[in-house]
Image (cartoon, rainbow, N blue to C red):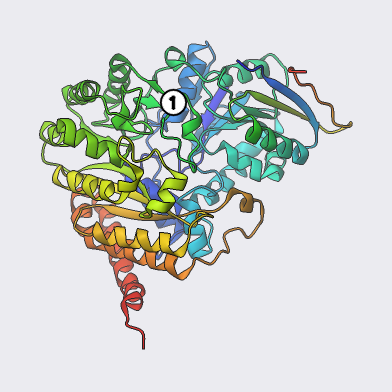
Amino acid sequence: MDVVITSDRTMITDHHGKEFLGFMTTAPPIFLPEKIWMSIAAPKIKVNEIGEPCQAPYGLRKIEAALLDAGIDAAVIDPDHLSKHPEAKVVAIGHHDYFALGPPSSEWWVLTGKEPVNARSFRKFMESKEMEYFRRKGAKIVVGGPAAWQWLYKPELIERWGVTTVIDGEGERVIVDVVERILNGEEPPKLIQVGMDEVPSLDEIPLIKKPSVNGLVEISRGCPRGCRFCSVTLRPLRHYTLDMISREIDVNLRGGIKGAILHSDDVLLYGSSSVYPDEMALLKLHELVKSKGVNIAWSHFSLSAVKYSEEKFKLMSKISEMFGDYYKGVEVGIETGSVRLAERIMPAKALPYSVKDWRNIVIDAFSIMHDAKIVPAATLITGIPEERPEDTIASIELVEDLKDFRSLIVPMYFVPMGLLRGESWYKREPTEEQLELMRVCLRHDIRWLDDIFSWYAKDLNPLVRRLISLFISMVKRISRGFIEIAQAPEL
Amino acid sequence: MSEKMVLKVKGIEKAVELFMDLQKRYPMRSIEVYVYGCSDNERQDDDN
């Protein structure tokens, strides 16, 4: 084999079939030994005789497909089985968060002062004897994926770990060029930014050939909203055809995966070229998934699209009816409860409504999802340079207004990229308002945790379920003090 | 469509610094930076 595509254990895992457990890889071990923490968050995955995992991250599957389509002998290989491919000339690596510099890892790092397990695991992987072997024999190491930018903050590691090329951007076209150059004996560039002219068009995006983790399939790329904190907005908008989506779901079904996680930067803008959700496109998309007989979940909804699609064509109610009486998960971005701040950092996030109505949009969308048994895992950003204490207070008040809606709300502590170069960037002190925001989110999450977990853990391995229950009771016990302190009246 | 920028830079630190600066200025453009370690900075920009 010429190219092995791989990553560390926090990536090459199926998280026990529970995508949300993957978030545990972004934290350091809390209350539990690291080994047990990792066994919950990132267990080893079944492999075949040549070390191919039965499921692999979607992004790695895309790179694999691009190389195979180009006639290059490549496969995703589990990190414990790299020694089965000593002849490989290229080791291609992808990751969501190589050095735990992105949210929510960066927040855990700030709060606990400890390095999250994803960064620990990746370091161990890069310093493993298998990777040392590849370096020594002159194999080329190519890194990319959504966290490729983090290498730019660790140039010393590019050298120490012998990284040949860093690819920043959508890599399906560029990886073929880079690998072909390597196989032809040429030296590829050290740093690559994928520009608009090298981004794959819809018909150049290869379809995955082997199953993706927990059945994740992409339906669109790009987002027209232009929020200031998000790089996705720089990507051109492309929607997969229903046939492409169907074929990828079939790949996962053949791999024994009984669910589909529809992935897009905003699933509810599928088929639309504006910020108005397209009724027919969305109905056809969900009818397609329904026809496959699999459970559904989504990667991201925008809250304004939730409200609009329900008010205009009852989409959430129809989905709920279509897929039955189980909770369905999705990530959503509240980001702030402050209209003042929303106007500055994400003026288009509320469209087609006015950003001045942002608070009501959030509340209405949560209410709609609660009724439709859709469980949002929501993010709030705090620590943005323009943020004033009154903005944080507005976010606190909004979280309190959401208390009756089944959801998890996670505050993301924003770390300006300029600070990431320093060794002690994570030694930052949240303000009293920011701490209070974290407390109200914790209070909200604890209120809903048992309800959500009892559904989520239904078909989980009993031992893992027991360990998570133990962890949740410890969180509750310890948090009680933290929350009560917040509620104590001033003397 | 803008042409690809191709640069050769001495040393990884300087290469990364230049690359990040170019990313800020030209977020939509294809950029390739080669790194070498034995001579002064040499810039080859297809635009020029």
Near-viewer residue (A73 or A444): A444
Give the x, y percent position of residue A65.
Answer: 45, 19
| Chain containing the residue with disc 1 | A
Which quarter of the rendering shows the C terminus of chain A?
Answer: bottom left
Give the x, y percent position of residue A438.
Answer: 38, 63
The residue located at (75%, 41%) in the rendering is B13
Callout 1 environment at 10 Å: few (<14), some (14 to 19), or many (20+)? many
Please indicate whether residue A207 sits to the left or right of residue B1 in the image: left
Q: Amino acid at mark 1?
A: Arg
Q: Is residue A162 visible?
A: no
Give the x, y percent position of residue A328.
Answer: 21, 41
Mark 1 lies on residue: A61
Check the image and name the residue furthest to the bottom.
Answer: A491
Please indicate whether residue A219 sits to the left or right of residue A63 in the image: left
Q: Is residue A70 visible?
A: yes
Is disc 1 placed on a helix, strand or loop?
Answer: helix
Q: Height in image: A204 above or below A429?
A: above
Quarter location, residue A441:
bottom left
The residue located at (20%, 44%) in the rendering is A369
Give the x, y percent position of residue A146.
Answer: 51, 36
Which quarter of the rendering shows the N terminus of chain A?
Answer: top right
Near-viewer residue (A270 or A460): A270
The residue located at (31%, 34%) in the rendering is A352
